[in-house]
Structures are given as C-alpha cells and as structure tokens.
Amino acid sequence: MFRSIARTETNKRFASAGLNRMKLSLPRSAPAVLIASGALLVAATGGAVAGGLVSSTDIKDNTIKSVDVRNGTLKRADLSSGTVRSLKGAYGHVNFDILSNQSGGITITQPNTGGYCITAPGFSSASSVIVVSPDYNGNATLPGNGRQSVVETNSGICTAPAFGVITLVQSPGATSITPTKQPFTFQIQ
C-alpha cells in the first residue's frame, strides 16, 4: 500500500510540473547484451589470471624457442648436467702416460707409441672438436738441442667417440718425425 501511495504522489508532482512520468523500459535484447558483456569481462580478466597458471604440462614439447625466453633468466639449475658439461667443455693434461688436471670422467688409451685415444663423457669426435698443444715444460723441445715436439690430432688411430692425438719429435737434421710419448694439454668443445 505504501508503494502505491508513493507512486501516486510522484505522479502528481510530475503532472503539476507539466511533465509526464517516463517509464524506463529495456529492449528485449538487454538480457542477452548483459550476459555477453559479463562473459567478455570474465574472458578478458580470466586470460591474465590463466597466464600465471601455465605449467610445463600445458606446453607441447619442443615448442619453446630462444625468443620465448628472456635473456639472462636461465640459470645453471635450469639446464641438464650434460648441457652444463658441454658448455664448459672437457680438458686435461697428459704427461706421457698420466692424465691429470682433467675436467672429470676422461679416459686415455695408447694404441701405439705416441698415440693417444681420449674419451670424454658427453663428447664425440664425430660432432665435437679437440684442440691440443704441446706442454713445452716437460717435452723433448729444449733450447739449444734443436729437437722439436709436435702434437697433432688424428682420427684414424681411434674409433668414435674417442679423439685421436699423436705426439712426435723431430730431431735436428732429421727428415722424418718420430712418434714418441710427449706431454700435452687438450680442450674439447
């Protein structure tokens, strides 16, 4: 009853002012527009929330590329141990028959005099390179004696994945180089 009295009073005020009370009516499509607007709002904000909820199970294998990762954000813990090892490379020092100062897990064999086969975990002579250098502190190269120590890579003396290295000495006046055990250092990348 109170409502009808209030409406009547309101209508009288509008009539005395010379105005007709306007009824506000919504078009028939209004509920659909409201529902669509609400869905749009949820979709727009839901995407931002979902972006923070993506896990590795949501990503297809081999779909993340270098451009998808911000520079400087990957840490050692994000990489496999094999990847970390390959970035460091393998290295060592061979003093005649003894392997020392090595990066770990490296083995050497000697198939012949002056020949060495070096095997490093995670590296293969088919896909990696070895750099060798004579160790002039302990080899046959001495000032004044004219002898020269030489170190070469030779894939023919070892089977992959091993790296072949030959150490040689050239004496003064000699026309040939003689395979001989000589110390050297190496780096594999």
Image (cartoon, rainbow, N blue to C red):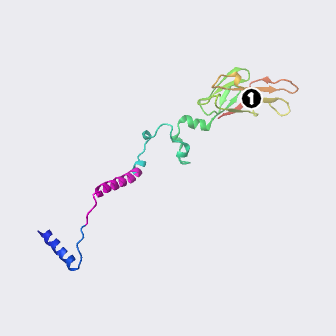
At x 73%, y 21%, the residue is 113
Quarter of the image holding residue 147?
Answer: top right
Q: Is residue 137 left or right of residue 126?
A: right
Q: Is residue 58 above or below residue 98?
A: below
In x, y percent, where is residue 27? 28, 60
At x 73%, y 29%, the residue is 183
Question: Would you say residue 36 sits in the magenta stretch?
Answer: yes
Residue placed under numbered mark 1 in the picture: 152
Disc 1 crowd, CA 10 A, few/some/many (<14, 14-19, 20+): some
Q: Nearer the viewer, residue 136 or 153?
A: 153
Residue segment shown in magenta: 24-48
By secondary structure, the bulk of the magenta-drawn segment is best described as: helix
Q: Residue furthest right?
A: 173
Q: Is residue 52 above or below residue 123?
A: below
Q: Residue furthest left?
A: 1
In x, y percent, where is residue 170? 82, 26
